[in-house]
């Protein structure tokens, strides 16, 4: 089981690091907001937030004084990443909707309040205990991912209908579908972890099957992100060939 857990987490770390850096490099050239927001979201939730949390957990027993600052940095990165995904969902899918804008700012305030509560109340000594701030930030993280997944599927479906008329790019349509899969897998993995902790009272790091679940969801997210943003040439050729057959 430990091997499977390691494979899933390693794949998620490598894929999210690669995709996040590539998106930020693309933003540096284009100065387009979507690339910046998703790049920050992927890096914050993935390699920075998740990676530092794993390091903190590994050294927690041997160096108890060093772990809390690392947990604090990890949770700050996750909060920034989640807020970036919230803003992406708003700006890309509902740019003129004031109600959605208000909800996004409320979510940002909730993420900030959860992090500051940990600073004041716990000092990040037990950041994964089932506290109100843990529940708040976890549910907001799940919400940004599952909302983004639903929006990507919805928009991707529109593009696939246009694709049959030759009015859309097959690569872009497929990218939205894959982002829906990746964000949905990451969101469901986090939701299962929160629900299981609510039932068992045990953090994810202390439950082997829960670690496996999170790892497998991370593996699905990693594969989807890789094919969405770092697709092999043969995969792109196949997409375009299938699109030409369908539209012709």
Image (cartoon, helix red, strand yellow):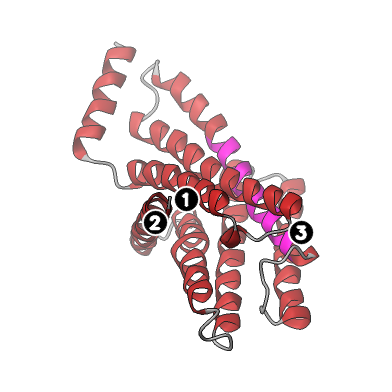
Residue 189 lies, in percent from the top left, at: 57, 46
Residue at 71% x, 44% y: name it: 97
Is 93 or 23 nearer to us in this picture?
23
In the drawing, does residue 74 fall left or right of residue 201? Answer: left
Residue 142 colored in magenta in the image:
yes
Q: Is residue 34 above or below residue 206?
A: above
Do labels 3 and 2 touch, CB within 8 Å? Answer: no
Is 101 or 217 nearer to us in this picture?
217
Is 102 or 106 nearer to us in this picture?
106
Residue 126 lies, in percent from the top left, at: 68, 74
Distance of mark 1 from mark 3, alpha carbons? 30 Å
Sequence-first disc among 3 and 2: 2
Prevailing SS of the magenta stretch: helix
Residue at 48% x, 73% y: name it: 58
Q: Which residue is mark 3?
A: 106
Q: Is residue 240 above or below residue 72?
A: above
Residue 244 lies, in percent from the top left, at: 27, 18
Secondary structure category for the residue under label 3: helix
Do labels 1 and 3 touch, CB within 8 Å? Answer: no
Q: Please provide the residue range marked out in magenta.
A: 134-152
In the drawing, does residue 179 fall left or right of residue 227? Answer: right
Q: Which residue is mark 2?
A: 6
Sequence-first disc among 1 and 2: 2
Distance of mark 1 from mark 2, alpha carbons? 7 Å
Residue at 65% x, 47% y: name it: 191
Sequence-first disc among 1 and 3: 3
Distance of mark 3 from mark 2, alpha carbons? 36 Å
Comparing labels 1 and 3, the label whose residue is closer to the camera: 1
Q: Which residue is mark 1?
A: 215
Q: Is residue 169 above or below residue 210?
A: above
């Amino acid at each position: 089981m430990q091997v499977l857990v390691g494979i899933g987490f390693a794949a998620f770390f490598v894929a999210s690091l690669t995709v996040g850096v590539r998106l930020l490099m693309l933003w540096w050239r284009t100065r387009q907001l979507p690339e910046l927001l998703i790049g920050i979201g992927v890096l914050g939730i993935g390699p920075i937030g998740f990676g530092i949390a794993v390091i903190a957990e590994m050294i927690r027993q041997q160096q108890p004084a060093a772990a809390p600052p690392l947990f604090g940095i990890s949770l700050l990165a996750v909060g920034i990443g989640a807020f970036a995904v919230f803003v992406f969902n708003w700006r890309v899918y509902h740019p003129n909707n004031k109600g959605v804008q208000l909800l996004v700012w409320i979510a940002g305030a909730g993420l900030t309040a959860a992090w500051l509560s940990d600073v004041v109340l716990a000092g990040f000594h037990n950041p994964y205990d089932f506290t109100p701030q843990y529940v708040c930030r976890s549910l907001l993280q799940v919400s940004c991912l599952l909302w983004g997944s639903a929006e990507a599927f919805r928009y991707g479906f529109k593009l696939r209908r246009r694709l049959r008329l030759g009015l859309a790019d097959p690569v872009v349509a497929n990218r939205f579908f894959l982002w829906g899969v990746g964000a949905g897998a990451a969101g469901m993995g986090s939701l299962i972890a929160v629900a299981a902790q609510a039932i068992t009272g045990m953090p994810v790091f202390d439950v082997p099957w829960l670690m496996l679940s999170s790892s497998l969801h991370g593996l699905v997210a990693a594969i989807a992100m890789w094919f969405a943003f770092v697709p092999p040439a043969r995969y792109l050729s196949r997409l375009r060939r299938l699109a030409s057959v369908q539209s012709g």
